[in-house]
Image: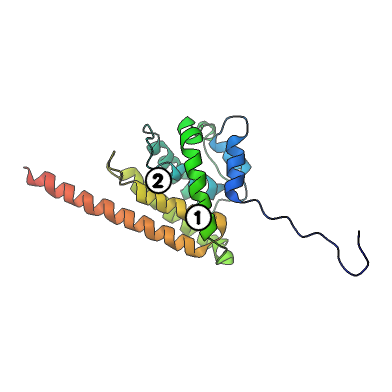
Amino acid sequence: MSDGRGDDTEPDPTPVRFSDALEAWLRSPGPKTIGGLDEQFAEKGFAVILLLLMILPATPLPTGGITHALEVIAMVVALQMVLGRRSLWLPQRWRARELGTTFTGKAAPFIIRRIRTFERISRVRGKRIMESDIALRLCGLAIGGLAVAAFLAPPFSGLDTLPSLGAVVIALAIILDDLVLAGVGLGIGVGGVALIMTIGAALVRFVTGLF
């Protein structure tokens, strides 16, 4: 009750951390699909979907070959960011695609821990820039390019890990409104692409030297 001396409005509760919201969604009943993810995190839907699509290729866990399919979907989502779309479009078959037991059972705890690590070290920096249309388009371009690099990495080489991690960090930067974190993600991704190109060139030279 107000005592007449001023506004007695209670302060807003502490915002729910993204990691807590994601964990609650993963533990909730029902199938865990890409479409459901978009509906749950509508405000940051593009970034959240790209984060979860690329985080599996970024983990040192056996994926059963699902990573290439996730990377292709990530390319389509990132392209829509580049084009400036505000709502996600995906074929119904893709929207209904479940993340799978590898993700929800084995990878999710690992992923949640890593996201919380980034939440501890991150803070809001350059929020107005990160929310601008041009920044979102550039982030989409960067994530799409890193998804292509991860897709083209030699299979079973582990070289897709760094480009995928770079894409994940950029997506987290969008979610957390952290411009510095976006720069870190870009640096990781570019380093991964350079590694793929260096090792790829060495392999080409080795193979051509055999003939």
Tag of residue 58: 2
In the visual, does 180 lie left or right of 16?
A: left
Residue 29, given in percent of the width and then of the height, sits at: 62, 30
SS assignment at label 1 = helix
Quarter residue 186 falls in: bottom left
Quick one: label 2, few (<14), some, or many (20+) residues within 10 Å? many
Mark count: 2
Of mark 1 and mark 2, the one earlier in the sequence is 2
Tell me which residue sits at (61%, 29%) in the image.
30
| Image colouring | rainbow
Quarter residue 127 falls in: bottom right
Quarter residue 96 falls in: top right
The N terminus sits in image quarter: bottom right
In the visual, does 151 lie left or right of 138?
A: left
Look at mark 1 in the image and give the residue it sits on.
Answer: 118
Query: Image height check: is 125 above or below 44?
Result: below
In 3D space, how far apart are the residues under numbered discs 1 and 2 (Cα atoms)?
15 Å
Q: Residue furthest right?
A: 4
Residue 205, given in percent of the width and then of the height, sits at: 13, 49
Which one is nearer the viewer's eye here, 127 or 106?
A: 106
Tell me which residue sits at (10%, 46%) in the image.
208
Residue 139, given in percent of the width and then of the height, sits at: 47, 57
Tell me which residue sits at (58%, 61%) in the image.
131
Query: Image height check: is 189 above or below 49?
Result: below
Tell me which residue sits at (37%, 31%) in the image.
64
**Amino acid identity at mark 1:** Phe
